[in-house]
Amino acid sequence: MQAGDCFLIGGHELTPHLWIILTRPSGDPARVLIASCTSRKPWSDDTVLLDRGDHPFIRHETVIAYTEIRIVEARVIEFQLGLGKITRRERMRRAVLDRVVEAVLNSTNAAAKFKQFILDQDDRSDATPKPAEKARGSRGG
């Protein structure tokens, strides 16, 4: 399990949503930060806007559901995958993952504890939140 891995939660009675692992596993027990993608609505926080081409599952304008971000034990995800309760999907490209992580750091709707979780394991020397900017359009490979 690593940053950029993606999976679906949802199924028969729930609309499936794409979840992204934003950080590498760390700590004991190993934990990761995960974020849910959801369709863009007029009231959405669009600090980062994802669209067709950013991930095979994404077919229209999509945002991060900042209220759904979670820190979870990596073994719980592995267990749920083994049970078939969640479904593994294609990995998120590094450039897109970087945009999403920056958006979490810059969003006014992401909780401070999630920002700190990222910063605590960030290897970049400039790992400080930047003033809120819209992270649109800069797609990379």
Image (cartoon, rainbow, N blue to C red):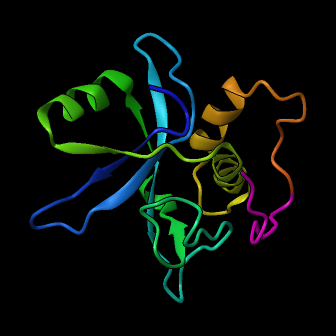
In the image, residue 97 above or below residue 108: above
Q: Is residue 84 left or right of residue 113?
A: left
The x and y percentages for residue 19 are 41, 51
Residue at the image position 23 percent from the left and 44 percent from the top: 86
The number of callouts visible is 0
Please state, as top left, top right, bottom left or bottom right, where the N terminus lies in the image.
Answer: top left
- Tell me which secondary structure the magenta stretch mostly adopts: loop
Which image quadrant is residue 109 in? Answer: bottom right
Residue 116 spot, x, y in % from top left: 66, 35
Q: Quadrant of residue 74?
A: top left
Q: Residue 124 colored magenta? A: no
Give the farthest residue toward the right: 126
Residue 136 screen position, x and y as percent = 74, 71
The front one of 80 and 115 is 80
Range shown magenta: 131-141
- Residue 118 versus residue 90 in the image, above or below: above
Q: Position of residue 67 (x, y in %)?
A: 46, 60
Q: Residue at position x 74%, y 56% from top?
A: 106
Q: Please give the name of the residue rendered at 26% of the width and 45% of the height, measured from the top-left corner.
A: 87
Which of these two is toward me, 93 or 134?
93
> Which of the 4 quarters of the picture holds residue 49?
bottom right
**Can you name the residue that lies furthest to the top here?**
28
74 or 140: nearer the eye? 140
Q: Is residue 61 above or below residue 84?
A: below
Q: Horizontally, is 78 left or right of 64 in the view?
A: left
Is residue 139 rendered magenta in the image? yes
